[in-house]
Amino acid sequence: MIARHVIVSGRVQGVWFRAKTKEQADRLKVRGWVGNRPDGGVEAMLEGDEPAVIELINWMGVGPTLARVDRLEEKPAVLSGFTHFEIRR
């Protein structure tokens, strides 16, 4: 199990980024959360098996069709024991 903190910048709000991230997380059995940032970016905490978390981070680097990802920052985080994946407002 690994945990990662991810910040995505670009055109990532108002383009279904959070909802599609949740769909991908649920498919991959990754737990944690995703939410909008005041600066227009999206932030996420991800926990799960390493291959699944890496796959989700790679997907977030592209995002859904209407998104434009300019930058993705990812760093290790402490496991928090999330039991599901949620969208935070």
Image: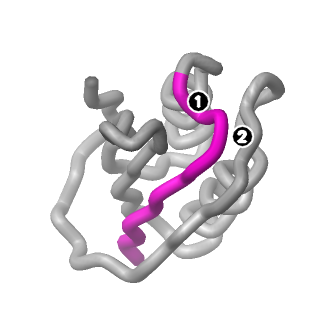
Badge 1 marks a residue whose secondary structure is helix
Location of residue 31 with respect to 52 vertically, above or below: above
**Residue type, numbered disc 1:** Phe
Q: Are marks 1 and 2 in contact (CB under 8 Å)?
A: yes
Q: Which residues are magenta?
A: 2-13
Q: Is residue 1 visible?
A: no
Residue furthest front as drawn? 39
From the top left corner, tell me how far across and down residue 43 is, in percent.
40, 49
Magenta highlight: main SS: strand
Local packing at callout 2 (Cα closer than 10 Å; few below 14, some 14-19, many 20+) is many
Alpha carbons under labels 1 and 2: distance apart:
6 Å
Closer to the chain start, of discs 1 and 2, is 1
Of residue 10 and residue 27, the one placed in the foreground of this image is 10
Q: Which residue is mark 2?
A: 63
Residue 68 in which image quadrant = top right
Residue 64 percent location from the top left of the image: 74, 31
Q: Residue at x 40, y 58 (%)?
A: 46
User: Which residue in the structure is indicated by mark 1?
Assistant: 17
